Amino acid sequence: MISLGSASAAPGETDTGRLDVGEARDGSAVGLPVAVVNGAADGDTLYLQAASDGDELNGVGVISRVIPRLDPADLSGAVLAVGVVNYHAFQIAEHRNPIDDTKLNRAYPGDPNGSSSERIAHATFDAATDADLVVDLHQGSTSRMIEEVRVRCGRHHHLHGDCLKLAKTFGAGHILDQKGPDGQLARAAPDDGTPAIDPELGGSVGWDEQSIQVGVEGVFNVLRGYDFLDGDAPREPQTRARDFNRHGAPAGGVVSFSADLGSRVSRGDDLFEVTDVFGRHRSTVTADADGILWRTRRLPQVATGEYVCSVATGLDEY
């Protein structure tokens, strides 16, 4: 039997249940939705999770499409999934856990006696690091973002090569290879010995079918590439970035972009123009270096100094 919370599955079976993480303000139990798919044959364990940031919903869409397609009779090993991690934030479609005003993906490895977010992080971290591979599904939240996979352990980490292999196998087309902030699962899990990646499936709040399908294909690439399922995963070269140049607004007004999201830009190329609400020119911002327009704000209105976009730099193929 393999168990996650109240879900338990014998070889060749699938089960769903709840992972207890405490109580709500009315004293009712709070349980995260979980699934266990236990393959008929032996093998490794893949851990999937979504919505550790409560407004990043594309990962929920990925898990809701992947789990029904997994026949345990065809699976070697097991897949464990937590469909919604940031329970309280998901209920109100907010980024941060409203119980403790915390970004949950900064709370790993968590604390069983800590805040709401730390307790959830602890419970899911235990499940993740009992597995052999971790895929923590995200998206750009309130920004527009290309599909990418983030390797967050840092380039000098002893599992860096394993995490890069996992990112390349997922195959979103772009990899950000940059050490992440303290408390991210994709950084904390490798420190505990488990390769982990953080796919960012598009951006802007909502539910985007194109990005969800990239995630579904990525998960199945991992399942085939690591022999959970028969078949080959196309490990095609990925465009890798090592850093970002962030650009803010030099004046208040309305932003219009001169380059498309995902396009290559050269140093000195126009990135965006700021006009006033009557369309009169205020300022033009150009690229500081060669790169890819990787991320942009969703809404056009800006104040002086407000974030507008990021250009990924230090590019190569991996």
Image (cartoon, helix red, strand yellow):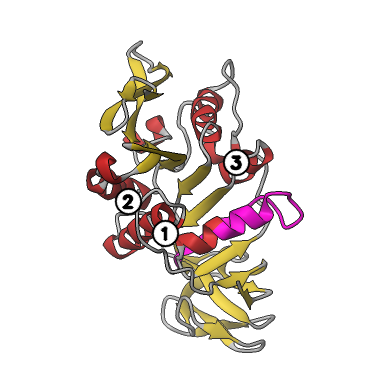
Amino acid beneath label 3: Thr
Image location of residue 55, percent across then percent down: 39, 46
Left or right: residue 144 compared with residue 252: left
Q: Is residue 173 above or below residue 269?
A: above
The extreme front residue here reads 41
Which quarter shows the C terminus?
Answer: bottom right
Q: Which mark is residue 209?
A: none
Label 1 residue SS: loop
Question: Which is nearer the N-term, disc 1 or disc 3?
Answer: 3
Amino acid beneath label 1: Leu
Label 3 residue SS: loop
Amino acid beneath label 2: Val
Magenta region = 145-165
Assess whether mark 1 and mark 2 are in contact (beta carbons under 8 angstroms).
yes
Residue nearest the viewer, comparing 90 with 21: 21
The extreme top residue here reads 27
Residue that label 2 marks: 62
Image location of residue 123, percent across then percent down: 50, 25
